[in-house]
Image (cartoon, rainbow, N blue to C red):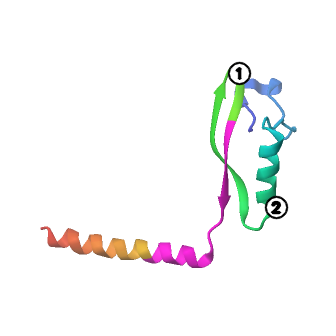
Amino acid sequence: IGAYAPAGQFSHKETRARKLLMHRREIDKLWGRVREKGYSIVPLKIYFKNGRAKVELGLAKGKHSYDKRDVLARRASDREIERALKGRNR
């Protein structure tokens, strides 16, 4: 959590250890998945409730390079189709 600039010298330390308030079974399940190749824990949402910062976590798996190429090719073809249709409607 980044420093709060208006607090000046009374701001919190950015790098201090923080507690993860979850059940041991949930932590073990996440940690087991993170140890596998390609998985990581991603913060999905950060919000404040009753003076505490809460973080909603998600487990994500990275894309393979061939997945990325498919997405790029699909975007390019969609762009071409949109251009063709845009010119045709006039």
Residue beneath label 1, please? 51
The first of marks 2 and 1 along the sequence is 2
- The answer to whether residue 26 is above or below residue 68 is above
Q: Horizontal placement of 20 versus 52: left or right?
A: right
Residue type at the position of mark 2: Arg
The dot on residue 35 is 2
- The answer to whether residue 85 is above or below residue 19 is below
| Magenta-colored span | 55-73
**Residue projecting furthest to the front:** 25
Q: Nearer the viewer, residue 9 or 48?
A: 48
Query: Circle 1 — which element?
Result: loop
* Displayed quadrant of residue 51: top right
* Displayed quadrant of residue 54: top right
Q: Specify few, some or many for label 2: CA neighbours under 10 Å numbering under 14, 14-19, or 20 or more.
A: few
Residue at screen point 29% across, 74% down: 81
* Displayed quadrant of residue 52: top right
Q: Specify few, some or many for label 1: CA neighbours under 10 Å numbering under 14, 14-19, or 20 or more.
A: few
Residue type at the position of mark 1: Gly
Name the image quarter holding the N terminus: top right
Is residue 72 within the magenta segment? yes
Question: What x and y, as percent, mark residue 76?
Answer: 40, 75
Q: Nearer the viewer, residue 27 or 3?
A: 27
Question: What x and y, as percent, mark residue 72?
Answer: 48, 74
Name the image quarter holding the C terminus: bottom left
Is residue 71 within the magenta segment? yes
Q: Horizontal placement of 46 versus 78: left or right?
A: right
